[in-house]
Structures are given as structure tokens and as C-alpha cells.
Image: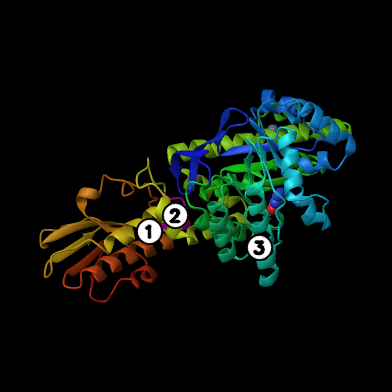
Amino acid sequence: MGDHFEIRDQDALGRIGELTVPRAGVTVETPALMPVINPHVRTIEPSRMQSAFGAEILITNSYVFYGSDDYREEALERGLHDVLEFDGVIVTDSGSFQLAEYGEIDVTTPEILEFQRDIGSDVGTPVDVPTPPDVDRERAEDELATTQDRLAVAEGVDTGEMLVNAPVQGSTYPDLRESAGRHADATDLDVFPVGAVVPLMNDYRYGDVVDVVAGAKRGLGRDAPVHLFGAGHPMMFALAVAMGCDLFDSAAYALYARDDRYLTVRGTEQLDDLDYFPCSCPVCADHTPAELRELGDREREELLAEHNLHVTFREMRTVKQALRAGNLLELVETRARAHPAMLDGYRALLDHADLLEREDSASKGAFFYLSGESARRPEVVRHHDRLDRLALSPGDEVLLTEGGPSDRYDESWNVRAPFGPFPRDLSETYPLTAEVPDRMDAEGYRAAAEGVARLAAANPETEFTLAHRGWPEAALAAVPERVDVVDLSG
Ligand code: GUN
Ligand code: ZN
């Protein structure tokens, strides 16, 4: 792997990074959104991508140029940046997506990589095989082997300064994704797209998307820049960034506009169903939904595409700011309320506690407890793991209390949902300074009770009393028998 990527800041598995693109002579800050340009359609002109939307990086499909004599000659003569009138970074895909859609394409990896190099692409892509979800294991393994052969071929092509993608495939088998990630990381290729997730996203299978990305991340390791191929809906950016994805491409802004669909961070709306625009981008500030419906097809499509792109860039900035501030998981938790499938995605992320625990930074601004899922955040997991290692004196009587007198005891600790017990001198340290609602939920109490159980198990010779304020029976069931329990709320 090249050394083109540096991580500047991290929250959960998400990071602010810097991708150096030698051929363009620039660095791109990640997470970055790459609008997809279809050279035949150009719903929004590439030149406006920079001036009106702040795009630093675009993606287009080199196979579209390669497959047409006219386009091909023009691209070879003038170069891609000139043809598209865009002087930022241009990434090119290889036609693999056409392969997935139509079953066949007429180009090899050396041919398309050399073509991408010759038209001036900044980041090229070999011909990977995008294996769909849920295929049998044998097919997933065979096609992954083909992709890996092509990565080896790509390593042998003279690509000059162009960076080269090493797509990670493996269908819906997390262990195949992991070994694909490990293999890709060991090549000397540069950027690592997680492939063939579009069908999962189209079916709202966000839990499966998370598992697939987690598999790839486990194999790739921390320093690899990861592109989530085909993920352009702003609804899932917070989740995907929190899983460690750095690059996103959006064709959605244009494809949805063609079908009169309006993107929001809470999902997709049909223009016909809207009475108000819940947005203040230039399009929504200047028009009502009724006015947009009155326009001709072409103008309406353009304006919808512009709104869709504005909301997409805005969400990426929102995600980056949350990451910087250390509250990315709170944003994920908020976005998860938009759709049950998003909630499933967030729960799947929390299922990868070991991966999060390894990388999430130990100290941030403030921990906001926002729902039962907060009780499963890495900060809570980490605190519980720590309780296993906190040694108390054998024979001592220790009070774990939410308040109330402690003079009868050898030692007195605080206890608080969702963390459970902690020594008093830690009460001003992250995450024990958490803001939690007065009306705690079952998951929070349960997590606190599990914390008590962990501490008790680690100190079998110490006597514990838990003095709580109205914890429910269901939570107290997790506290071992030998802990005395007192309800202070009477
Ligand atoms: N675009 C969306 N998914 C894929 C993929 O798996 N491979 C390539 N090359 N392009 C894609
Ligand atoms: Zn808008």
C-alpha cells in the first residue's frame, strides 16, 4: 500500500484524513463526496460542481469514453479534465458496474488502466467483479479470486503517477470481505473501495452494509483510505463515516431527480407529496414545491438535482463537524431514527464493539445519552472492561451509591446508568461526565447493573452494597445475589 493517506482526527471508526493525489498535485480532505458525472447526461455541468457546490473531486466512468469511438478520441486528444472542464481531482471507474448490470464488457484490466492513464485520470480502477449479495459461497470465492488476479495484473501495469483503486469484494460473506481486505492491503495499490453494496443499499439492508464494511475494515487496517462504492444517499453518510468510510460517490443526486425524487437526511420524498421544502438551499429558498411542479421536465430535473446535491454536500459537512467535535455517534444515533433500516444499521455498528473499542478515541467533549442504543456505545463497553481490572481490598465493605450516607463503609463509589460503578475521583472525567435523561430507560439501567456485576466478579472477596434510586427489577436481575441492594427512592 502507498503512503498517500494521513489521518488527522478520529471519532468511532470515522476519520478526517488527507489523501494525497500526486497526479493532480493536491491533497483532498476526507470524508469527501465525489459527484458522479455521466458524460452523456451532465445534469449539472462539472464546472459548476466546483464553483456552486465546492466539489474538489469527481468520479466518472472511463468505460463510457472507451466504448464510443468519438468520445474515446476526444478524451485521448484533449484529456479528461479538459473534456469535463474540471480542474480538480478526477477518479475513473472501469466499467465493472456495467459488468454487473449487463453481464459482459469488452475490455481488460491493462487496457482500461492504460486508457485511464492516457486520458489523465487521477485515480484509476481495474476491472473488478462486483459479486451480488447472497450468492452461494463458491461463486463468491471464485469471483473474488478473479478480482484478486486482476489486482495482481494492475500492479504490473505502468500507471505512472495515477493512483489505483483496489476494490474489495466478497458478497455478503464477512470473512471473505476480511480476507479480500487483507489481500488488497498487501498490494501496492492505493485506494480501497468496498464494492457491490449498491444492491444492499437499494433494498435498505443497512445492517448488511455495516457488516460488509466491517469485514473489509478488519482486513484493511486503519491506514487504508476506503471508498464506499455507489453510496450517495445523504441519509447514510453519518453511519458509513462512523464505520470508517472516507470517500463517497453520488449518482443519486441526478438519478433521483430524474424520477422527481427529493433527497433529505431522513429519506427520499416524492416531489408530488411535498407541500413545503424542509431545506434552505438556493433552490428551496427560491421555489415552493408547487412552483417546481409547474416547470418543464428539463428545468425541474435540474433544480431537483441541484437541491439533491446541496443537501448531500451539506450532510457531509455536518458529519465532518460532528466528527471534529467528537459527537459523530450522537449524529448517527439521531439519523438512525429516520428509518427502522437505519436503526438496524446503527445496531449492527454497535455489534462490532471490539472493532470500535480498538479505535475510538478515549476522550471527547461530552457524552449525550440519547436512546437505549447509547448504552451500547464504545465508551460504555470500555468502562465495563475496565471494571474487570479494578481491584478493591479483599474483606472491605464497599458502597456503590447514587447518593445517600456512606459512613458505615470502608469505601464508597458512585454508580450511574449506563456506566455502573466508578471511583469518585473519576467523576469529572470523560465519559462519566455524561449528560443523561432523568427518566432513564431499561437499557441504561441494565447496562449499569451489568457494570455492578462485572466489578463484583472481579473482586470476589469484597462485600458490596448497591444503593440505587428506583432501578427496575428487570435490571436488578443482572446484579449477583451476594450484592446487598437498597432502594433509596423508598
Ligand atoms: N460501482 C458501484 N459498485 C461498484 C463495484 O463493486 N465495482 C466498481 N468498479 N464500480 C462500482
Ligand atoms: Zn434544498
Residue type highlighted by circle 3: Ala
**Secondary structure of the residue carrying numbered label 2:** helix
Residue drawn at (27%, 64%) of the image = 388
Residue 392 is situated, as x and y percent measured from the top left of the image, at 16, 63
- What segment carries the magenta color? 369-375
Of the residues tagged 1 and 2, which is closer to the observer?
Answer: 2
Q: Nearer the viewer, residue 225 or 213?
A: 225
- Quarter of the render that holds ligand 2: top right
Foreground mark, 1 or 3?
Answer: 3
Look at the image and tell me whether residue 154 can be seen: yes
Would residue 181 be found to the left or right of residue 400 on screen?
A: right
Left or right of 450, for residue 157 = right
Instruction: Tell me the tag on residue 145.
Output: 3
User: Mark number for residue 356?
Assistant: 2
Residue position marked by numbered label 1 in the rendering: 381
Residue visible at 35% across and 56% down? 382
| Residue 444 position within the rendered picture, expressed as x and y whole percent measured from the top left | 40, 59
Relative image position of residue 195 (x, y in whole percent): 66, 53
